């Protein structure tokens, strides 16, 4: 249980740093990461499920950033 929380906090920090670097509003992404951690933990998910949720959230951030940049270039 504690290792899941630790991994969730580490992923939240990493998403915060990545969002800050890309100028995407880091607090929202960090809260989303912690929310994903809480949801996966409460549903009884394993470490694999937690990591998959974090990778999916990172993929969502990447997709949003690509779409945002394409809109500004037009």
Image (cartoon, rainbow, N blue to C red):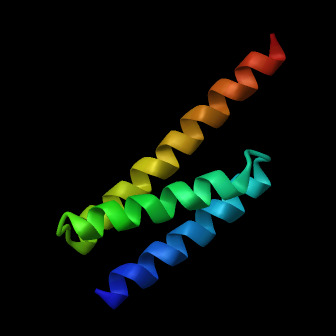
* Extreme residue toward the top, this view: 74
* Extreme residue toward the left, this view: 44
- Along the line of sight, the residue nearer the viewer: 2 or 67: 2
The residue drawn where x is 62% and y is 71% is: 13
The residue drawn where x is 78% and y is 55% is: 21
> Can you give x and y, in whole percent of width and height, for residue 26 in the image?
71, 55
Image quarter in which the C terminus is found = top right
> Can you give x and y, in whole percent of width and height, for residue 31 in the image?
56, 59
The image shows residue 24, relative to residue 49, as above or below, that is: above
Quarter of the figure with residue 61: top right
Image quarter in which the N terminus is found = bottom left
* Extreme residue toward the bottom, this view: 2
> Can you give x and y, in whole percent of width and height, for residue 17 in the image?
70, 64
Q: Is residue 8 left or right of residue 13?
A: left
The image shows residue 9, relative to residue 36, as above or below, that is: below
The image shows residue 3, relative to residue 17, as above or below, that is: below
Q: Is residue 65 left or right of residue 38?
A: right
The number of numbered badges drawn on the structure is 0
The residue drawn where x is 66% and y is 36% is: 65
Q: Is residue 23 left or right of residue 62?
A: right
Q: Is residue 32 left or right of residue 27?
A: left
- Along the line of sight, the residue nearer the viewer: 27 or 13: 27
The residue drawn where x is 46% and y is 49% is: 57
The image shows residue 68, relative to residue 30, as above or below, that is: above
> Can you give x and y, in whole percent of width and height, for residue 42 in the image?
25, 68
Quarter of the figure with residue 16: bottom right
């Amino acid at each position: 249980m504690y290792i899941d929380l630790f991994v969730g906090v580490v992923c939240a920090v990493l998403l915060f740093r990545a969002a800050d670097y890309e100028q995407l509003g880091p607090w929202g992404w960090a809260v989303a990461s912690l929310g994903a951690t809480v949801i996966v933990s409460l549903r009884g998910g394993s470490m694999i499920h937690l990591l998959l949720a974090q990778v999916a959230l990172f993929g969502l951030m990447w997709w949003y950033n690509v779409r945002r940049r394409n809109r500004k270039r037009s």
